[in-house]
Image (tube, coloured by chain):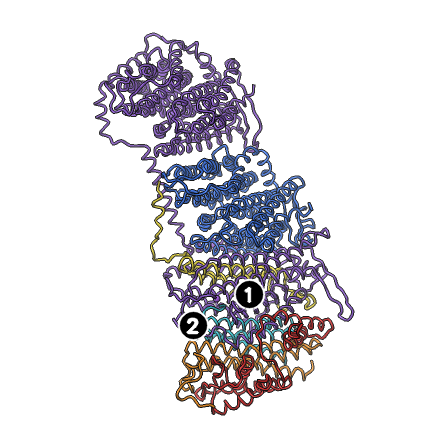
Chain colours: A red, B blue, C cyan, D orange, E purple, F yellow
């Protein structure tokens, strides 16, 4: 039997293992066994409902990416808070179309999610050919700079992480 | 095994229904038929044994989960409940037999649903716990919703929406009532409630009274008491014949609950709440008979007529509740059994007539002759005589017992004219209907198939009650007398019902 | 101090909830209303957590977790409904 | 209770509460549906994060063992919030909701709704 | 001898024709006659004892609590009637053999006839009031069958229905009367009743009982004003008329009067009602008979008249009158039966009964004519025939009549007038049919009937003669014993001689003769006089009365049962309101003594939110989508409230149910119109608001009153036993899966059945999907947004993990199978939303029906497991185990039960939702709304 | 607290009942849902309100009455099943009868069924 049959979603399995321990606030042996069991069986059950996605090739980079996003979320929120509390007439919202280098579903989704979670931007739509990501920004000062920053800060690492 | 007897009438249909949903039985209709007939015959056997056992040994208590009453749920098989369980089981068998002729082919899950329905009704009869009664009400209701739409068609859909919506509101009211009762009595066991109700403080008694009154609404809705009977005619007359036949017992569940709750809990020993529904139920009972009679006269077809006769029988039974004495309850029980059998039979006969009269169905219009005039004629005639209370069939015994149970002059003044005039109207309506159905015919030949042996067997099974309940009227009334005595003299059974004493 | 803080924060969450309802009732578009409902789900998670902290118990954690999960499903279904009419097609 | 823990918890809570409130305030104040999308999806993530971490700290302290299951809620919210926003944005686009008049590149609304590449005359040229 | 056999033999005889039909008509008739003949012999065998003054009795217990015994008596009265019923019955069997045509089902006819015979014998021999009534009703039914024997004819059906309705109504009145009598006397035993005349007459309810019994008797005996049904019963084959309307059925009413004569008569009321009714009937019947052109019609009204005569006799205050009544019963039976049979022969052999066409039959059937003329003469009261004797006695008795006070002279005068009419129509019968020129347009050439068809007539006519000439020899004993039964032994002196000398009665007879002949001679004037009055057809009148009744019932029925759910719902709620609010009036103080809980800002806010969103739902209920959103808010806040008030399990359940419900409602919203039209009138809205507000107020009040009072409940037991007895610390869960596991079993059954029912509903559903949303916008093209699909896939394992978590901890902490099941379902539904049905169907091979079945089955089998340990169903088991390294853990049967719950929930939810999804997957028609 | 709670229950009942009295299926279904909220809250409160007393043994000194909670749980599940059924039934009615009126026919239309007239014997 192939590895993918016995362990169809290794990353998910890891996630589930951790999640189980999180849920139970416990690292007792009993829970470890149970966590391992569930981390193994649940992906087996879910496997038929999974479509193939590119795998994470560089986990370390991914972790760094996550931390960076978390940090950005905090700053983004402060920005938004200021905008919300300041007079509305200063607001300069706008739509932006970002050309995508990423091609596959999962990386695009991650990118779009990242954009939504960070500074004043929301991913609104992906074009059918998945070459354009439409975003709405709450306050635009420089459109091109924003596009450039997103591509450099998020898209590039993602390309590397997923190896595409 | 004998100690598990009281739960068998609930468990057997449940298990049967479940097995029918699973392979290998779910695969073919033939297997479903055999299995469901076997299961319902076994249920009948269990019910019969239970009744005999209860008759011989006294009240049977089944303590579910081994949690002693009043804490856990108990099933109580007394003379009343075991009789009704037996009645239900016979009815179920008849409905299944009838359906095996092809009615079960017109939609999915017929057999499991009938068995679920049996489980619900039997459970409602057997349970000694008021919330569990609610649960079984819901089981039998949801099964009836599903059965009502069996076969499809506009009328069914239309009738079911009314039926379902009203019953959903009814279920909500039931829960409100349960809240009020639990909130004052602090218990759910019916026998235990009866010990608590007399000890309530004044304010609590008011709340319990409101709850009890609300229960009257709920049971009245189920029983089709005026002004809550509107759902019945359409629902019953649009349902498939075997389903309508089985539904004949459904209104009786409401009546049974009135006996069980309002005679036991809010009965003679309820202190300030004693006999609280009596002033209400009198006019309602009589008006129900009137409404049913008017409906019977106005019915354009046999099924609607039968449905309205069910309403009349409900009114008559409500009178027995209103009379509140042992004799009336005994009379009511006899009448209940008889009227259930016969209205069920009449629904089946109506089904056969519809099948054989072509486009006219069971409507009271001129049409082609039925294929089997002698067979259907005899069946109809016997059923009609019985339901109209004409001797020598069981109807007259029921009617007479009811008349006799009015012992005060004022009671007679209300009860006798009501029952007698409704009888007359029944005779008029049935003779009009019957003569038209069988005798006003064109020269066209019927093109339908003759009734299948299954259908004949089902009708016969039910109609046999008409002579048998008269021939064995002695033992039968002896039984109902004893059942009524047991119900009215509850304190005598309390040490059986609550072995550990009240909570 | 902790109790006062919880009290203040609860007040903030309550105000937030009222504001959400205002938006829900006000609209103008259905997407605004759904957005408001979604925010209400999330704010009620906050409320439940605060209550749990106030009571010092973990018992309400699952409720919060379920709101997080089910609120999402609900919002998605509502959006799907507006987009396609048929949510399960 | 340890004053430091208490202060930490209080600060976290206040931060969380502040952001929750701001998010909802934004929901009310912001002028059009596209801008309103920003406020709750963002503010609630940090707002909720603050409260969840506060809860984690407090529970861990009070119960004497690691109470980290709140992280799971955070995880859920982080995963789902962008999708919610995306779906809502899709809905708003589909409903052709009017954007604030001074919104830039409004012509993209039509392209986005049709999920086509940006095709308007003033679209910026990218290589 | 066992009296039981007398009715039983005919009863068994009912089967005889059905069994012997195949052996041919004669054999069938012969076999049919055997058992009644045996019964007749038994009666005759018992006769000497009865003549000797013994009342034979026999009884068996039947239904004691009903007071019904199978109890028979044979006294003089019963004997007389038995002889009539069985004797004439046998003649009718013979007669009918030749009367019925090849097309008529002879076996059916005989079966009905013998059934009727049984019923009649039953009535006259009954010694128990209920038994009497039982057979009484049986005569109504069997006569209904006989009258409607030719049921393809409209008049047969209508006549039968009318007879049934009138006699049925009378039967019910009789029943009430008999029950009342039994109530007064305290027994259903006729012997006891017959001995309690004084008690009865003195009782305050006597008038009611009397009137009720008389109603029964009068309807059956076709007394005025209930006489109208009898002529229309002539639609029956003539043997039936000959039997029912001469000797038997109509005589049942007379029998009843005679039977209860000892206990009910003797009061002013009796005499007044009975004699006046009889007199009126006598005159009316005789008068109308004059104008009937139909032979049987004439005979029918003549019967009415003679029944009136007998009634009048029974209503007179002398014992001799009663004797005369009994005598006339016999005489009328003989001559009228023979006349009917003769009429039948004429009809049979000439094809007509119309006296305007039938003329001069003397030439064609002299023998039959002779017989008919003798019988008719007896009917007219010609001397040397039996009719003369009883009529003479009747005239004599009218002269002694004093009950009408100073108007009593009118009785003999009117009686004579009746006699005049009687002679006139008898003359007409003879002259119009057998003489009076040549027949006109008869369908057949008349001729004498078959030999055996005449025999019954011959026997009866011979009886008329014999009785007329040798009354004492032939009938003396019978009349004595019958009369003494009626008079309770006080038999007066009377003589049955033909000649009493010249006296007033003879004069009256002579006047009657002369007057009758004169009237017949001048009948043209009378016909002209009568022609001024519009002819009323009782049948039409009755039918239209019934039609009116039906139409009225239909109108009333339509008025209150108008098919409007809103009305039904309103009535239900109003009824609930009235019943529930009533008791509240007695509640002095709403607030109880239980200390109130404090309230804080959060709670107030939640309450405000709840109320606002509930009200918003009400206000915007016509904008369905918005209302759905506000409804969701209500659900959310209710869940939070549960959490707040220490019910985490409830909060979890409510939340998860909420989501599934919202999804369902959205599915419904898609197929239903998006908006509710404004169609309620302001009045209705105000009405609905009022009742809703009142119910809300009542519920709130009760709730408040309840919550503020202390409660002493059984719950302490659960708290105390949850851990030690149920093995779990989450008491709510232990109640669900253990203490009240039976409820839960029922509950998941409900869920399963609902899913099956929904499957049935969906099975043949044809719904057109709207082409666009409520504003007419076309739907978005993107069926399955990519990002949603991606994220959903990642969330699924996490959701499953959470549901396992919730499931496993349920027994000890908030959670459990139901919530876990819903979480799993929602996660799967989310997949359906994200990927669509087809995608899922290809990948998820789960049969949801099996899932439901096995889920409930697992729960049930868990319960059954306890049987192995001799414990009742659902007895739980749990224990703690310790494994090295892993530690201590608990295993409980309740967990398996909960697993059943879990599976059922998944199966049911997905069966519903996934199938709904399938509705439109394959094609997406875009028909516009068809409303 | 009790007063506020009772007011809420009363108001939910009011809303539910008003909606149940509407003429179209969807509002009626919503009304039934609303009514079931009221019912659940009412039944729940029959065990009296209690703060901080979840019936999880070992977490408190006194506990809320667990029995009504269990009853309400059962009621919620049953209510869910019933609601699901009635929702689909409403759809079915729309499919079969062509409209979403609770009576299956639109109010201003006169009754077209003249069947009864012909039935007069
Ligand atoms: Na679909
Ligand atoms: Na649980």
Chain letter for mark 2: E
Q: Which residue is mark 2?
A: E779
Q: Do dots 1 and 2 share one subunit?
A: yes
Classify residue B366 as left or right of residue E361: right
Which of the two labelled residues, at mark 1 and mark 2, occupies the earlier sequence position?
1
Determine which quarter of the picture holds residue E831.
Answer: bottom right
Pick the quarter of the image with the C terminus of chain E.
Answer: bottom left
Quick one: SS at disc 2? loop
Residue E565: assigned label: none
Left or right, D11 with reference to C20? right
Against E47, residue B343 (above or below) is below
Q: Mark 1 or mark 2, which is nearer to you?
A: 2
Position above or below: E201 against B492:
above
Residue closest to the far right: E884
The chain ID associated with circle 1 is E
How far across and down, in percent of the image, does residue F33 sit?
50, 62
Figure quadrant of the N terminus of chain E: top right
Q: Which mark is residue E657?
A: 1
Q: Is label 2 within 8 A of ligand 1 (CB to nearest ligand atom)? A: no
Residue E583 in the image, given as x and y percentages of width and height: 51, 53
């Amino acid at each position: 039997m192939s590895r993918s049959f016995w362990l169809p979603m290794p990353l998910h399995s890891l996630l589930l293992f951790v999640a189980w321990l999180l849920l139970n606030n416990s690292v007792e042996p009993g829970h470890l066994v149970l966590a391992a069991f569930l981390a193994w069986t649940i992906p087996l059950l879910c496997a038929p409902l999974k479509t193939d996605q590119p795998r994470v090739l560089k986990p370390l980079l991914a972790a760094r990416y996550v931390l960076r996003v978390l940090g950005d979320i905090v700053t983004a929120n402060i920005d938004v808070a200021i905008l919300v509390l300041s007079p509305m007439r200063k607001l300069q919202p706008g739509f932006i179309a970002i050309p995508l280098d990423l091609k596959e579903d999962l990386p695009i989704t991650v990118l779009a999610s990242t954009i939504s979670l960070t500074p004043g931007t929301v991913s609104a739509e992906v074009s059918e050919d998945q070459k354009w990501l439409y975003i709405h920004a709450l306050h635009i000062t420089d459109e091109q700079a924003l596009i450039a920053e997103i591509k450099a800060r998020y898209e590039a690492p993602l390309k590397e992480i997923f190896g595409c | 095994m004998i100690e598990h007897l009281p739960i068998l009438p609930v468990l057997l249909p449940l298990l049967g229904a479940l097995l029918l949903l699973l392979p290998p039985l779910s695969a073919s209709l033939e297997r479903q038929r055999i299995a469901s007939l076997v299961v319902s015959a076994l249920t009948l056997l269990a019910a019969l044994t239970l009744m005999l056992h209860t008759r011989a040994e006294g009240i049977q208590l089944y303590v579910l989960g081994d949690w002693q009453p009043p804490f856990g749920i108990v099933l109580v098989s007394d003379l009343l409940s075991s009789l009704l369980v037996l009645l239900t089981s016979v009815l179920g068998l008849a409905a299944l037999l009838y359906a095996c002729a092809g009615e079960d082919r017109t939609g999915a899950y017929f057999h499991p649903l009938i068995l679920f329905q049996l489980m619900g009704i039997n459970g409602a009869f057997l349970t000694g716990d008021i919330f569990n009664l609610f649960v079984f009400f819901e089981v039998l209701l949801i099964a009836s919703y599903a059965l009502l739409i069996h076969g499809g068609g506009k009328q069914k859909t239309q009738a079911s929406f009314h039926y379902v919506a009203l019953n959903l509101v009814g279920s909500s009211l039931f829960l409100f009532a349960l809240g009020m009762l639990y909130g004052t009595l602090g218990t759910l066991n019916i026998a235990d409630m009866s010990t608590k109700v007399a000890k309530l403080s004044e304010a609590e008694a008011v709340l319990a009274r409101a709850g009890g009154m609300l229960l009257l609404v709920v049971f009245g809705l189920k029983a089709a008491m005026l002004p809550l009977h509107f759902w019945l005619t359409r629902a019953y007359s649009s349902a498939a014949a075997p389903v309508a036949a089985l539904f004949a017992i459904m209104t009786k569940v409401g009546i049974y609950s009135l006996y069980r709750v309002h005679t036991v809990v809010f009965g003679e020993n309820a202190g300030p709440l004693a006999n609280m529904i009596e002033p209400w139920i009198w006019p309602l009972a009589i008006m129900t008979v009137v409404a049913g009679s008017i409906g019977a006269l106005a019915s354009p077809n046999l099924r609607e007529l039968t449905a309205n006769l069910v309403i009349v029988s409900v009114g008559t039974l409500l009178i027995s509740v209103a009379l509140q004495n042992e004799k009336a309850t005994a009379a009511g029980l006899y009448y209940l059994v008889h009227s259930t059998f016969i209205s069920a039979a009449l629904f089946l006969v109506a089904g056969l007539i519809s099948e054989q009269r072509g486009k006219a169905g069971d409507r009271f219009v001129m049409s082609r002759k039925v294929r089997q005039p002698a067979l259907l004629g005899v069946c109809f005639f016997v059923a009609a005589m019985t339901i109209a209370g004409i001797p020598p069939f069981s109807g007259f015994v029921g009617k007479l017992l009811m008349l006799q149970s009015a012992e005060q002059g004022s009671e007679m003044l209300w009860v006798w004219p009501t029952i007698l005039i409704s009888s007359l109207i029944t005779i008029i309506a049935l003779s009009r209907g019957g003569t038209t159905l069988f005798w006003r015919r064109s020269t066209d030949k019927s093109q339908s198939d003759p009734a299948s042996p299954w259908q004949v067997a089902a009708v016969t099974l039910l109609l046999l009650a008409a002579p048998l309940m008269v021939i064995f009227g002695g033992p039968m009334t002896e039984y109902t007398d004893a059942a009524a005595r047991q119900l009215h003299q509850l304190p005598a059974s309390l040490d059986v019902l609550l072995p550990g004493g009240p909570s | 101090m902790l109790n006062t803080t919880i009290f203040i924060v609860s007040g903030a969450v309550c105000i937030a909830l009222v504001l959400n309802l205002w938006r829900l009732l006000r609209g103008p578009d259905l997407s605004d209303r759904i957005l408001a409902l979604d925010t209400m789900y999330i704010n009620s998670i906050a409320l439940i957590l605060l209550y749990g902290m106030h009571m010092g118990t973990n018992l309400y954690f699952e409720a919060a977790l379920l709101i997080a999960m089910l609120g999402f499903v609900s919002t998605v279904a509502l959006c799907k409904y507006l987009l396609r009419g048929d949510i399960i097609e | 209770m340890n004053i430091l823990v208490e202060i930490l918890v209080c600060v976290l809570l206040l931060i969380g509460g502040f952001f929750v409130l701001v998010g909802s305030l934004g929901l009310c104040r912001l002028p059009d549906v596209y801008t309103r999308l920003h406020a709750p999806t963002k503010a609630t993530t940090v707002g909720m994060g603050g409260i969840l971490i506060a809860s984690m700290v407090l529970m861990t302290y009070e119960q004497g063992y690691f109470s980290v299951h709140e992280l799971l809620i955070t995880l859920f919210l982080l995963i789902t919030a962008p999708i919610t926003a995306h779906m809502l944005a899709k809905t708003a686009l589909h409903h052709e909701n009017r954007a604030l008049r001074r919104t830039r590149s409004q012509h993209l609304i039509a392209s986005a709704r049709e999920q086509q590449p940006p095709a308007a005359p003033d679209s910026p040229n990218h290589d | 001898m066992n009296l039981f056999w007398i009715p039983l033999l005919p009863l068994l005889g009912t089967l005889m024709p059905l069994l012997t039909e195949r052996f041919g008509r004669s054999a069938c008739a012969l076999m049919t006659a055997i058992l009644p003949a045996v019964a007749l012999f038994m009666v005759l065998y018992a006769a000497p004892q009865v003549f000797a003054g013994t009342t034979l009795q026999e009884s068996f217990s039947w239904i004691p609590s009903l007071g019904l015994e199978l109890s028979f008596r044979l006294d003089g009265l019963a004997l007389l009637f038995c002889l009539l019923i069985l004797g004439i019955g046998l003649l009718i069997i013979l007669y009918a053999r030749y009367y019925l045509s090849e097309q008529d089902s002879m076996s059916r006819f005989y079966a009905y006839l013998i059934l009727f015979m049984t019923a009649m014998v039953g009535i006259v021999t009954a010694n128990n009031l209920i038994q009497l009534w039982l057979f009484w009703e049986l005569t109504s039914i069997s006569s209904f069958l006989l009258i409607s024997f030719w049921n393809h004819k409209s008049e047969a059906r209508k006549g039968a229905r009318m007879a049934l309705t009138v006699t049925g109504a009378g039967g019910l009145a009789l029943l009430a009367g008999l029950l009342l009598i039994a109530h007064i006397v305290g027994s259903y035993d006729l012997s006891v009743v017959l001995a309690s005349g004084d008690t009865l007459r003195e009782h305050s309810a006597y008038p009611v009982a009397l009137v009720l019994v008389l109603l029964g008797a009068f309807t059956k005996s076709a007394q005025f004003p209930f006489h109208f049904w009898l002529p229309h019963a002539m639609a029956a084959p003539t043997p039936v008329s000959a039997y029912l309307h001469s000797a038997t059925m109509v005589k049942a009413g007379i029998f009843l009067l005679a039977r209860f004569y000892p206990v009910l008569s003797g009061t002013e009321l009796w005499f007044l009602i009975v004699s006046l009714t009889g007199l009126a009937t006598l005159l009316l019947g005789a008068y109308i008979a004059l104008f009937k052109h139909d032979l049987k019609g004439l005979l029918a009204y003549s019967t009415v008249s003679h029944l009136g005569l007998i009634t009048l006799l029974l209503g007179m205050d002398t014992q001799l009158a009663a004797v005369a009544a009994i005598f006339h019963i016999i005489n009328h039976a003989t001559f009228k039966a023979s006349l009917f049979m003769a009429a039948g022969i004429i009809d049979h052999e000439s094809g007509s009964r119309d006296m305007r066409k039938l003329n001069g039959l003397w030439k064609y059937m002299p023998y039959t004519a002779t017989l008919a003329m003798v019988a008719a003469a007896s009917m007219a009261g010609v001397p040397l025939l039996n009719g003369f004797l009883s009529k003479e006695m009747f005239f004599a008795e009218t002269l002694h009549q004093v009950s009408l006070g100073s108007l009593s002279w009118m009785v003999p005068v009117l009686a004579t007038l009746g006699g005049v009419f009687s002679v006139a129509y008898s003359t007409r019968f003879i002259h119009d049919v057998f003489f009076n020129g040549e027949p006109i347009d008869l369908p057949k050439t008349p001729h004498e009937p078959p030999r055996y068809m005449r025999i019954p007539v011959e026997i009866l006519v011979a009886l008329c003669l014999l009785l007329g000439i040798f009354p004492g020899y032939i009938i003396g004993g019978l009349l004595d014993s019958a009369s003494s039964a009626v008079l309770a032994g006080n038999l007066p002196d009377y003589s049955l001689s033909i000649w009493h000398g010249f006296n007033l009665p003879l004069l009256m007879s002579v006047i009657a003769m002369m007057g009758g002949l004169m009237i017949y001679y001048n009948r043209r004037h009378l016909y002209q006089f009568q022609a001024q009055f519009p002819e009323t057809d009782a049948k039409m009148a009755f039918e239209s009365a019934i039609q009116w009744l039906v139409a009225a019932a239909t109108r009333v029925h339509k008025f209150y049962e108008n098919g409007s759910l809103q009305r039904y719902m309103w009535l239900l709620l109003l009824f609930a309101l009235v019943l529930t609010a009533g008791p509240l009036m007695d509640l002095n103080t709403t607030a109880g003594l239980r200390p109130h809980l404090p309230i804080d800002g959060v709670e107030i806010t939640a309450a405000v939110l709840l109320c606002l969103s509930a009200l918003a739902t009400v206000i915007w209920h016509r904008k369905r989508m918005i209302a759905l959103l506000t409804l969701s808010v209500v659900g959310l806040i209710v869940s939070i409230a549960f959490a707040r008030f220490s019910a985490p399990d409830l909060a979890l359940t409510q939340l998860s149910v909420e989501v599934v419900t919202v999804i369902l409602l959205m599915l419904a919203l898609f197929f239903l119109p998006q908006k509710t039209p404004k169609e309620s009138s302001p009045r209705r809205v105000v009405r609905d608001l009022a009742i809703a507000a009142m119910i809300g107020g009542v519920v709130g009040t009760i709730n408040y009153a309840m919550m503020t009072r202390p409660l002493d409940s059984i719950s302490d037991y659960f708290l105390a036993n949850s851990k030690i007895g149920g093995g779990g610390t989450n008491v709510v869960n232990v109640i669900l899966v253990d203490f009240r596991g039976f409820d839960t079993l029922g509950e998941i059954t409900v869920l399963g059945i609902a899913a099956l029912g929904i499957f049935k509903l969906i099975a043949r559903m044809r719904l057109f999907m709207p082409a666009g949303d409520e504003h007419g916008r076309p739907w978005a093209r993107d069926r399955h947004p990519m990002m949603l699909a991606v994220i959903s896939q990642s969330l699924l394992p996490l959701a499953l993990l959470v549901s396992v978590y919730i499931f496993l901890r349920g027994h000890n902490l908030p959670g459990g199978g139901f919530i876990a099941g819903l979480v799993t379902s929602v996660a799967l539904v989310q997949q359906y939303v994200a990927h669509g049905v087809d995608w899922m169907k290809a990948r998820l091979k789960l049969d949801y029906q099996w899932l439901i079945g096995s889920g409930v089955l697992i729960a049930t089998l868990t319960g059954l497991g306890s049987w192995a340990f001799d414990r009742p169903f659902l007895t739980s088991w749990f224990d703690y185990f310790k494994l090295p390294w892993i530690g201590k853990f608990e295993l409980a049967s309740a967990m398996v039960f909960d697993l059943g719950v879990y599976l059922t929930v998944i199966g049911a939810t997905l069966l519903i939702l996934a199938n709904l999804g399938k509705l439109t997957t394959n094609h997406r028609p875009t028909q516009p709304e068809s409303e | 607290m009790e007063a506020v709670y009772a007011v809420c229950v009363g108001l939910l009942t009011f809303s539910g009942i008003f909606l149940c009295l509407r003429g179209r299926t969807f509002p009626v279904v919503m009304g039934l849902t609303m009514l079931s909220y009221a019912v659940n809250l009412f039944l729940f409160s029959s065990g009296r309100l209690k703060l901080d007393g979840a019936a999880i043994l070992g977490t408190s000194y006194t506990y809320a009455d667990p029995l009504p909670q269990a009853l309400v749980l059962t009621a919620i599940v049953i209510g869910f099943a019933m609601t699901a059924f009635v929702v689909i039934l409403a759809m079915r009615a729309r499919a079969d009868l062509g409209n979403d009126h609770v009576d299956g026919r639109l109010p201003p239309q006169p009754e077209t069924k003249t069947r009864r007239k012909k039935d007069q014997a």
